[in-house]
Amino acid sequence: MKIHSTSLKGVGLLLLGLATAGVGRTLAADIDSLNLVSFAESSSTNTVGTAVASPFKEEPASTPVKAIAAEPAVAMDSPSYAAGDMSGYDSFSGAPGKIWFRGEYLHWWTSGAHLPPMVSTLTGAGVPETVFGDQTVYNGNHDGYRVAFGMWLDCQHRWGIETDYFDVSGKPCNYDNGFSDGWVNANAFPIVRVVYDPSPALSPYNLQGDYIGEPGQTVGRIHVETSNYFQSAGITLRRQLRASEWSTSNSEVNWTDPSARTFRLDAIGGYRFARLIDTVNEQDDSFVYNSGQPNYLYDYNYTNNYRTVNNFNGGELGLNAVYTFGRWSLDVVGKAAIGGNNEYVSLYNQQTTELSNYAGHGVPPAQSNPNPLQEFSRNRFSAIPELTVTAGYQVTDHLKCTVGYDLLYWSAVVRAADQIAVEPTTGYPYGTLLGNYNTLPAFSWNESHYFAEGLRLGAELRF
């Protein structure tokens, strides 16, 4: 039988196909063992249309890969965070917000200083009686304001920074008798300044009456005013020490939930500046109209101004605890600033005498004190402890209404009224008689303290 070459070629091609198919199966197993099946599956799911099964899946992989189940993430607002220590995540007291601004109205009561008699009259026996002075000034209720701005520095609300400023202006205590000729309702009522006369003829100092309005002799006017001003500014860094929150409900803790409670305790530290300024200013003008007097037509002008300034700079440390229950919150801050206080005293005492006549002519004024201004300054160690308690009500996510109480003490300060002599050895004499300034005693420091307490009413915005 004759075999054609064409038949032999067909048989050879058949054998080659069978061998190729065997090698293909071996490659499929090897590829499947390399875990490329997952690649084929993912490609089929991401392709538009009907996925075609891979021929490589006809035989299982020689070594199957074990699947590892991933642990589910626990959300921070899940019920598992409804109680316990909150120091490890975004913790805050009350409604959320990274930045806050607070504005408050202040109504404070402050301590004062004793003002010696500034304006007096004389009884029929010549005994002085005080018309104005011999009283406490700078005290009582004062109005002011406080503003604060702060922000959290991290997402966990562990670190924060806040700056604040407050300003309290004292109510002035003034006196002005108008022009007086020494008569009131046809009764003698002379107006005098009771001063110390340092004349060597008087041993050692005597109280003398410098007449401003004297019946039949002089006509004049006296004006006295006092003022005080207190301000402070600071910047503090806060660090969370502890934070917890809990709720009786099964939902996440939220300020809108009446059963929600939160608590956090922060340490605060920073810098504090404070300034206290007091003044006592007196001016009087008396004119001699009795032609029988040797100083007829003389016009006497006295100016006695006393001013003190306290500038405090120091470091501040304290604790801040905040407790919230639903919409309500209670914020308590206890802190103390310790540093140095620069005490400054300014004394201005001057007498000017002018000769006048009815034609309007006169002579240049004669000044009796060649050095009317005296200034003194020194540095003293001082401390300013402060306690604040604030209650708040969260109206919305961004708005809270607040009412609070403040208690503040400042050691080692000088007050203007204290620098005026009550006795010749305890201060600088209030004025002089006939310009005897060159024989006045040396200035002596009189130091006291400052105390303030009061209410606050305001609002806080958070964003």
Image: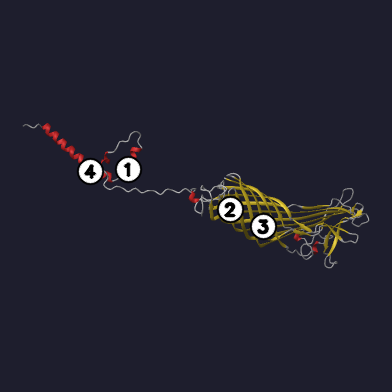
The quarter of the image holding the N terminus is top left
Instruction: For label 1, count other residues whose C-alpha is less than 10 Å away and answer few (under 14), some (14-19) or many (20+).
Output: few
At horizontal 33% and vertical 38% (from top left) the residue drawn is 44
Task: Report the number of discs.
Answer: 4
Q: Find residue 312 and report its horizontal and vertical position in percent.
A: 65, 58
- Quadrant of the rendered structure where residue 213 is? bottom right
N-term-proximal mark, 1 vs 2: 1
SS label for mark 1 = helix
At label 2, counting other C-alpha atoms closer than 10 Å, the crowd grade (few under 14, some 14-19, many 20 or more) is: many
> Label 2: which residue?
323
Q: Amino acid at mark 3?
A: Leu
Q: Are marks 1 and 3 in contact (CB under 8 Å)?
A: no
Q: CA distance from mark 1 to mark 4?
A: 19 Å
Label of residue 26 in the image: 4
Mark 1 — residue? 38
Q: Earlier in the sequence, mark 4 or mark 3?
A: 4
Amino acid at pointer 1: Ser
- Distance from the alpha carbon under mark 2 to that under mark 3: 23 Å
Q: Which residue is found at the position 59% from the left and 44% from the top?
A: 396
**Alpha-carbon span between mark 1 and mark 3:** 73 Å
The answer to whether residue 161 is left or right of residue 14 is right
Please tell me whether mark 4 sits on a helix, a strand or a loop.
Answer: helix
What label sits on residue 408 in the rendered view? 3
Mark 2 residue element: strand
Q: CA distance from mark 1 to mark 2?
A: 55 Å
Instruction: Give the mark nearest the N terminus, 1 or 4.
Output: 4
